[in-house]
Amino acid sequence: MGLVGIASGKVLSSFSVFLFLTILLLAVARRISTSVLLFSLQSAVITAEVLATAIQEKLAEAWVVGLLVFVIKVVAIPRAFFVLTGRLKTVRDVKASTTPTQSVFIVALMIYLSYAGVHSYGQAVHVPDDALAAAVALILTGAFLMVSRTKAIMQMLGLLVLENGIFLAALITTFGMPLVIEIGIFFDILMGLLLMGIFTFRISDTFDHLDVSKLRRLRG
Amino acid sequence: MKIVLDLAQVLLIVLCAPLVRGIIARGKALLQRRQGASIWRPYAELIKLFRKEELVPPTSSAIFRAAPAVLFGATVCAAAFIPVLHASALMASRGDFFLLVYLLALARFFLSLGALDGGSAFGGMGASREALVSSLAEAPFLLGLAAVAILAHRAELAGIVAWTLEQNVFDISAVHMLALTSLAMVTLAETGRMPVDNPTTHLELTMIHEGMVLEYSGPSLALVEWSAGIKLHLMLALLVALFFPWGMASPNSSWGMAAALLLYFAKLAVLMALVSVIESAMAKLRMYLVPDFLGVASAVSALAVIFTVLVKR
Amino acid sequence: MSAGATGAAFVFLLSVLGLLVPVILMAVRASSARKLAVALILAALFAGCAVAVKGFLGQAVPVLDFSRATPFSFSLAVDPLSAFFLLLVSTVAIPVTLFGGSYFELHQPEPRRRWTWIFYSWFLLSMIVVVTAGTGFAFLAGWELMTLVSAALILVEGDSEERRHNVFIYLLMMHAGAAAVAAAFFLFLPFSHSLNLSAMRTAGAALPGGIRAAIFLSAFVGFGTKAGLIPLHLWLPRAHPLAPSPVSALMSGIMLKTAVYGFVRFTFDFLAGGPSWFGYAVLLAGAVSGLLGVLYAIAEHDLKRLLAYHSVENIGIIYLGLGTSLLFLSNHAPLWASLALIAALLHTFNHALFKSLLFLGAGAISGAAHTIDLEELGGLQRRMPITGTTFLIACCSIVGLPLFNGFISEWLTFRSFLGGSVLTNTKAQIVLPLMIGVLALIGGLAAACFVKVFGVAFLGRPRSAEAERAVEAPVPMRAGTTLLAAACVLIGILPGILLHPLVSLGQALIPGSGVPEETLIIARVIPWTAAIILGVVVIAVLPKRTQRMVATWGCGLSQLTSRMQYTSTAFSKPIRFVFTRVYRQDRKVERLPTDQPYFPVTISYRSVRTTSFEKSLYRPFVESVVWLAQGLRRMQTGNIQAYLLYIFLALVSLLALLRFQQ
């Protein structure tokens, strides 16, 4: 077993702390680049959890999944975001519709709710409470980001955080997913992102800004 | 023997305070690609100030002259609460963290009064802004410390440190992470560092702490500057003691003590480097954004307290 | 002192305050009569202290029974809880009376002064009757007398439309509260068959849940109105500033505490706690009062209104302690409940001390500078050093800084919140430690407010000619404030003096509790802290320094005027800006028209602040009552046929009722 084994055993339970920290910091981040950086940190933590599962459960395909998560979510997608924001030349601000204090209280409430909701389920299925609560909290935070940020890019980011949460929840409850399903989900997300990227470009070209709240002017 | 060690801890915090300021200033200078002053410069400054003549505004009262001494006394007393080398300090086994925080509040109260007694506009401006920052920073300070205390089932600092020493380093506790985040933010606010306040500014309209000390000169100014340094050192030492105390030794072995001292300086160096990086990387927040900053710290510390219940379940 | 001597002292106290002093003052008009009256009041209060100490130490005090002279049973008894509050009344009233002796001589013309002293002694008598009442009738009689006499004291001070309007609101709210208190007493009647406090105590053990809740709610609302809990606090900032300063000191320092006494008597003595929602309701009321009280105080620059709002805040802190205690009681943790109760009672005593001191200081200021508007004061510390130092001690105490008495009670409250984490009930485990944050915020804002008060009033340069000409207060006034300040510092450094008897009071009120060790811890730590701080201060001050008086750097301007200093409004601006939702402000900026629109000659700025409660809570309530009344008015048609119809309908419905009852 050795040190690696012990470390991987501790990872699943302890690392959810870092996920909570990234969630809280996402709630107060004021620049798009900061939010993207936090997203890639989040994905790195999830990669670590996948690798820990791989070592504990001795699944070969989990290694492949971990590699995929790392390459796509920690490296490729954030890079694409940075390139996109560079070419769009929009203002770097996140344009949140709630103040940082309100956002962080809402996110704290959501973390508490995810713990409360997961408690009874976790005891029934013998799953570590912390990690599952982190997954639910990620889902809620992704939804919150989509609702409260009025820039189109931030809504894409919110969808990605949501997907992170779903992935983590699946990982914990099944201790390793079949590779096929993983690849399917990844391609779905990739397609969605490509489409969103194209549309964002076009929107910005036509209207010179990405403010979603101004869509109301398109009403007939 | 224990009492000698406890007194040595207090003297360590008090006497090394200017060195801490000097090292952070030098770190900032290096990050900004400047030469920077020597790390021993604050000592030279204090000695120079103690020798100078003091200028007192004629409209001021005894409060102006008494405030620096009270500030210094309260800060030094607060320094007696922090365990540095071993899991105990002069007051750490009797006094708890509420007394520590309120001693710092006593120091700040008299500093603000001294600022208002100067009779100038800048003192009032500094005191008014400091009132805003400190009134909002007390809640996350106490909540963060309370979260750690609840986990340790003790309120005395010595007890908390002793409990932490028994824990496993690799069991990262959510409560401690959240408490550390909020206490780090409070440290930046309370000690007047970026992004809350710029300690090196010379523009009076941007000053918070510096605005309050504008009227002081000579030995009074030396006491005020020294107290600010002691406060910075003791907050950093508090963070080390509460969250990374491993390495503290028992008073019996002198080799253990020497090792504890070196380890303490190493941890302090890491924190000082972090402070330099944060100060150089972040711009000062606009005054009315500081309540947002402290509001985030409050929410994180409240979450830490809530987590103490969730973790136990 | 034997029991007989104690009884004699008690009778002496009551007779002096009730009969002797008024008679002397009515009969003889010379100033020597007034001096004799003051001396007699002081002697009576000393007797009161002696009686209280005896009762507090657990020794029996004879019961004074006047039932034969009154229509309902009227008796006065001193048990440990009453003794504590009697001690509070007597000890705080002594320095206030000393101060008042000189204050009224200087500031009130003759016919008013005599009546002020008569009402003053009756005011003290009524408060003593309330805290030592042994039957419900005695309590309610004292309660009513308190309201009427304090209203009389305010009206004696002067006459104006505004004064009469504010006193009207005061009387209205006090009577509404008294009705609720009377209801709380009478709800006991079916179960206790008499209004003796001992009968009510035995009946309280076996009350059904619904009656218990009803009694708790009526006691909460009734005593809350008198104490000044939000949203029932509207009379406080109207009544306190209008009374003369010694009377304000008594009202804020002692009268509010009688409400706390009543509430503690009902919930802890009679009802012995209750379900946990009692505790949560009281906690909520305490938290809201504390926060909103201090926020409203920060926005004020009239010193007495500011202090009135701070009374609301401190009552909130006391209720936080009481709510915590109730919560611990409902969770079967008597030791912690006792700690929280001791914290609340100690804060009651401390608040009486430092609030009276603050109001006396305000009186000294108004006597010297003829104004209590902070914007007109400044530089008073150099001109009134003793008044300034005692006022500073009071400011440090109310903020809760270590070495002063406010810190001890706030520390105990904090520790009781922390103790909430050892309970097994999850809700309490989360709520109580979070209250630490609430109390910390209240304390931080209070500190900001008092830096403003002391700094703007006493430090810097005088902002008006009157403040520049201020002179120190006369000796009796200084003596009064010094006594209170000394008490604050004494309890702050040696808290064991009060804590030790309070622990036994806690054990008497909450059966099954022991000695909370926090009380012992703080009594040991604080003297050490004081020693260290004083030691370091002496070392820092000792070396000789050369000092030179030189004017402050004015950025090149040759002369700094007092208008360049920060004003009270400017100081509180950042905090008011952050909490802007709490203050609904109404701002009007008018440019008065001139010939040249681009060079305005006069711009007027008007900012009115109504506390949100008047608009959102009281006005709709008042309007619905008026609407209801107008609807009922339609029944009064003035038409005889209609009235005959009403009588006919009443007869028919009575007959129907009789029919269906069988």
Image (spheres, coloured by chain):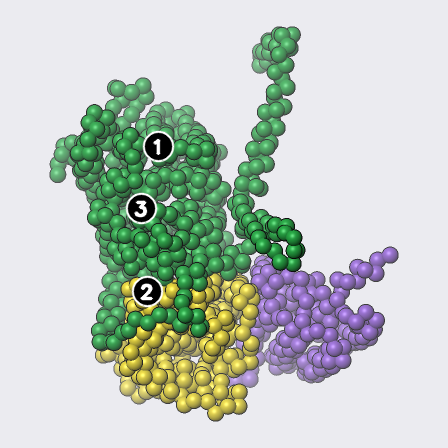
At mark 2, the secondary structure is loop
In the rendered image, residue C99, in percent from the top left (x then y), is placed at 25, 44
Q: Amino acid at mark 1?
A: Val
Q: Relative to B78, is A113 above or below?
A: above
**Contact check, label 3 and label 2, Cβ < 8 Å:** no
- Quadrant of residue C199 within the rendered picture: top left
Residue at x 62%, y 17% (from the top left corner): C635
Mark 3 lies on residue: C367
In the rendered image, residue B143, in percent from the top left (x then y), is placed at 45, 63
Q: Which residue reaches farthest right?
A: A220
- Quadrant of residue C258 within the rendered picture: top left
The number of callouts visible is 3
Q: CA distance from mark 1 to mark 3?
A: 18 Å
Q: Which chain is yellow?
A: B
Q: Relative to C590, is C113 above or below?
A: above
Q: Have a look at marks 3 and 2 and say if they share a chain.
A: no
Residue at x 21%, y 46% (from the top left corner): C476
Mark 1 or mark 3: which comes first in sequence?
1
Q: Nearer the viewer, mark 1 or mark 3?
A: 3
Q: Amino acid at mark 3?
A: Gly
Mark 1 lies on residue: C156
- Please give the chain letter of the residue carrying mark 2: B
At mark 1, the secondary structure is helix
Q: Have a look at marks 1 and 3 and say if they share a chain.
A: yes
Residue at x 38%, y 87% (from the top left corner): B41
In the rendered image, residue C248, in percent from the top left (x then y), is placed at 35, 41
Q: Which chain is green?
A: C
Looking at the image, residue C333 sits to the left or right of residue A10; the answer is left
C555 or A207, nearer to the observer: C555
At mark 3, the secondary structure is helix
Mark 2 lies on residue: B60
| Image quadrant in which the N terminus of chain C is located | top left
